[in-house]
Amino acid sequence: MRKLKAVGYLFLLVMICLHVLGFRNLETLGDLKGVFLISLLIAGIGCSITLVYGVPVSILSDKITQSLKGWVRLLAAFILHAAVGMIALWVQEINVINIGLLFAIMYWVIDEILRKLEGTPNNKIP
């Protein structure tokens, strides 16, 4: 359940960040609708990919790092999430790697915060 919560929080975080960045360049009130639609599109597609692709990878990362403790587990989980987030480099030759890596790192941070808040031990896979 924590993994699905993390995707929801990721969606909200991306929407908020894109809105904040989008408001800097608003000239008319009509532009607000465009900013919202673009933000919704990016967050929706990114979180859909994270749900289908990122959540299973995160569960696998938890399984791989469950025997590690402390900062070693954090570092190993971060490296696994970042490496999988950069997989777009080999799949496509466009500049999607930055978005995939950004979503992977944000998902990892949210998941670790939720792990701490819920008190989930490192050796328990949700």
Image (cartoon, rainbow, N blue to C red):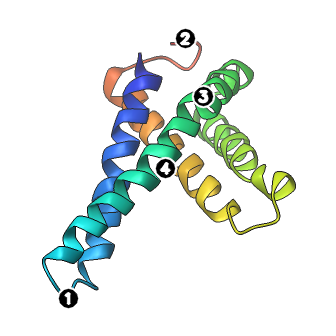
According to the picture, the residue beneath numbered tag 4 turns out to be: 106
Quarter of the figure with the N terminus:
top left
Determine contact: label 3, label 2, CB under 8 Å: no
Residue 39 drawn above or below residue 68: below
Furthest-front residue in view? Answer: 30
Determine contact: label 4, label 3, CB under 8 Å: no
Element marked by disc 4: helix
Q: Residue 52 — which label? A: 3
Q: Residue 89 — which label? A: none
Q: Position of residue 16 (x, y in %)?
A: 28, 58
Q: Position of residue 9 (x, y in %)?
A: 34, 39
Residue 30 drawn above or below residue 89: below
Is residue 41 rendered to the left or right of residue 60?
left
- Mark 1 surroundings: few (<14), some (14-19) or many (≥20) residues within 10 A: few
Residue type of the residue flagged with mark 3: Val
Q: Residue at x 20, y 70 (%)?
A: 32
Residue in the foreground of this view, choosing between 23 and 112 = 23
Q: Residue 124 — which label? A: 2
Instruction: Tell us which disc is closer to us: 1 or 3.
Output: 1
Residue 90 drawn above or below residue 77: below
Instruction: Tell us which disc is closer to us: 2 or 1.
Output: 1
Q: Residue 27 — which label? A: 1
Whichever of callouts 1 and 4 sits on the residue coming sooner in the sequence is 1
Instruction: Tell us which disc is closer to us: 4 or 2.
Output: 4
Q: Residue at x 32, y 58 (%)?
A: 37
